[in-house]
Image (spheres, rainbow, N blue to C red):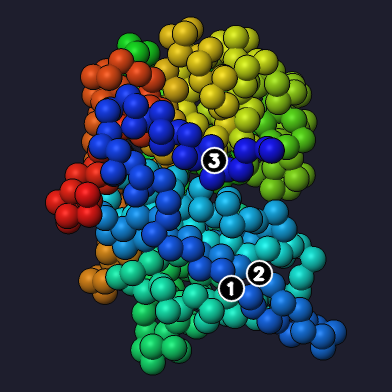
């Protein structure tokens, strides 16, 4: 039988438990979510018929604080996937050192085949169905695959109607006008940039004029590339789902972004030559940022990777087999739960601002994020060195250690 994402998440946890000689009772608790709610949401479709959708909310662990994690709308959502993602969110919050635990939600649907009205009725129906287990001190959802600030605004409004007063802190990733945070859009890419700067110091790489290749030119790829080019690095290759572009002198990242919004792709950008996504990954460069899909670097191509440093902008772009090859080659990999934790960290800042009803400037947000990411990177590096493991396992040890300490102090173990 094929392994589910949840089986994979448990296997990673068990590997980490062996390395740190984890208390078996703590491991037993961590293997399972605290609760998983399954709901059925009747929605009146535009043609008048009622269609019932299935949704989930998994709450993995709240030893450090309220549950936190996105809600995705996708036809392939399963209960096992949502359980796995909620566990990974526990580790991401633990690595970042923020007082939140892991949660995740999903609805089995294809929003691309639905009208705006149908998506709104589904969103409000889902939040009404899970409202008893969410709240600004209980569980704080956020955007994920196929959801955005628009859905968060509906979620917040639905919950506020149920409470009878405004509760902006029940979700993060909201539009600025209703309690969103400055700096949220750029946050994940900024976090990638900060961790690359820290890793470059450890590896003795000067970022001034360092060659950078970025696979995936969505939000994370764009901002990672922008911040790196502002640091003096040369972004020599960029790609999207249609292919990549290369210029050894370096690309103007903002100009590429403008070109992509006009033409729908980075391809045929003036002054560059078109290359394949494989060529972007295997390029001769100092820094590689896979910010597209999972499984891009694997047992088949890892030995052809030429970068000295890799930062996982996407979730899971390197397989365990790929990890092993890169570790043997001496390539430092900044794992996803550390590299892209800038998003959840800024969501935490948004939540804090909502609770205080006092809002920070973009400079405040950036300074706080930079400090948090530097500290998180150094904690992970220290654990990886102590246990003689790669940065991924260092991040896991860091996160699990933090969560287990909180569990023990509470008397759960």
Disc 2 designates what residue?
54
Q: Residue at x 36, y 79 (%)?
A: 167
Q: Residue at x 48, y 34 (%)?
A: 11
Instruction: Tell me the quarter of the picture where residue 200 sits.
Output: top left
| Label 3 Cα neighbours within 10 Å, binned few <14 / some 14-19 / many ≥20 | some
Which of disc 3 and disc 1 is earlier in sequence? 3
Disc 1 designates what residue?
39
- Residue 120's spot in the image, x, y percent? 64, 77
Nearest the eye: 389 or 99: 389
The answer to whether mark 1 and mark 3 are in CB contact below 8 A is no
Nearest the eye: 334 or 75: 75
Disc 3 designates what residue?
7
The answer to whether mark 2 and mark 1 are in CB contact below 8 A is yes
Q: Nearer the viewer, mark 3 or mark 2?
A: 3
- Residue 306's spot in the image, x, y percent? 56, 10
Q: Please tell me whether residue 292 is drawn above or below residue 203 in the rendered image.
A: below
């Amino acid at each position: 039988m094929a392994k589910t994402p949840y089986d994979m998440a448990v296997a990673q946890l068990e590997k980490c438990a062996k390395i740190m000689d984890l208390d078996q009772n703590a491991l037993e608790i961590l293997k399972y979510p605290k609760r998983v709610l399954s709901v059925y949401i009747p929605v009146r479709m535009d043609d008048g018929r009622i269609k019932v959708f299935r949704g989930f909310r998994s709450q993995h662990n709240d030893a450090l604080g309220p549950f936190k994690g996105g809600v995705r709308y996708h036809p392939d959502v399963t209960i096992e996937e949502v359980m796995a993602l909620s566990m990974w969110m526990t580790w991401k919050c633990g690595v970042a050192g923020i007082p939140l635990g892991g949660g995740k939600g999903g609805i089995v649907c294809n929003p691309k085949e639905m009208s705006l009205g149908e998506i709104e009725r589904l969103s409000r129906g889902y939040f009404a169905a899970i409202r008893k287990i969410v709240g600004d001190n209980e569980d704080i959802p956020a955007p994920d695959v196929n959801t955005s600030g628009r859905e968060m605004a509906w979620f917040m409004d639905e919950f506020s109607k149920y409470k009878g007063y405004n509760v902006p802190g029940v979700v993060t990733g909201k539009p600025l006008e209703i309690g969103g945070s400055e700096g949220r859009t750029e946050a994940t890419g900024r976090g990638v940039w900060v961790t690359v700067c820290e890793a470059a110091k450890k590896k003795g790489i000067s970022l001034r004029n360092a060659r950078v290749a970025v696979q995936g030119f969505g939000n994370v790829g764009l901002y990672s590339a922008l911040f790196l080019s502002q640091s003096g690095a040369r972004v020599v290759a960029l790609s999207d789902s249609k292919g990549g572009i290369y210029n050894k002198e370096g690309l103007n990242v903002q100009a590429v972004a403008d070109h992509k919004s006009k033409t729908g792709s980075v391809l045929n950008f003036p002054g560059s030559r078109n290359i394949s996504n494989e060529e972007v990954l295997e390029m001769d460069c100092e820094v590689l940022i896979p910010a597209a899909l999972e499984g891009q670097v694997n047992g088949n191509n890892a030995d052809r990777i030429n970068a000295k440093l890799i930062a996982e902008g996407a979730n899971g772009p390197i397989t365990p087999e790929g990890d092993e090859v890169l570790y043997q080659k001496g390539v430092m990999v900044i794992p996803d739960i550390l590299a892209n934790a800038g998003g959840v960290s800024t969501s935490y800042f948004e939540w804090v601002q909502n609770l205080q009803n006092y809002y920070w400037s973009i400079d405040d947000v950036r300074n706080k994020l930079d400090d948090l990411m530097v500290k998180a990177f150094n904690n992970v590096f220290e654990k990886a060195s102590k246990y003689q493991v790669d940065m991924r396992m260092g991040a896991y040890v860091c996160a699990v250690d933090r969560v287990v300490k909180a569990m023990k102090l509470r008397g759960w173990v």
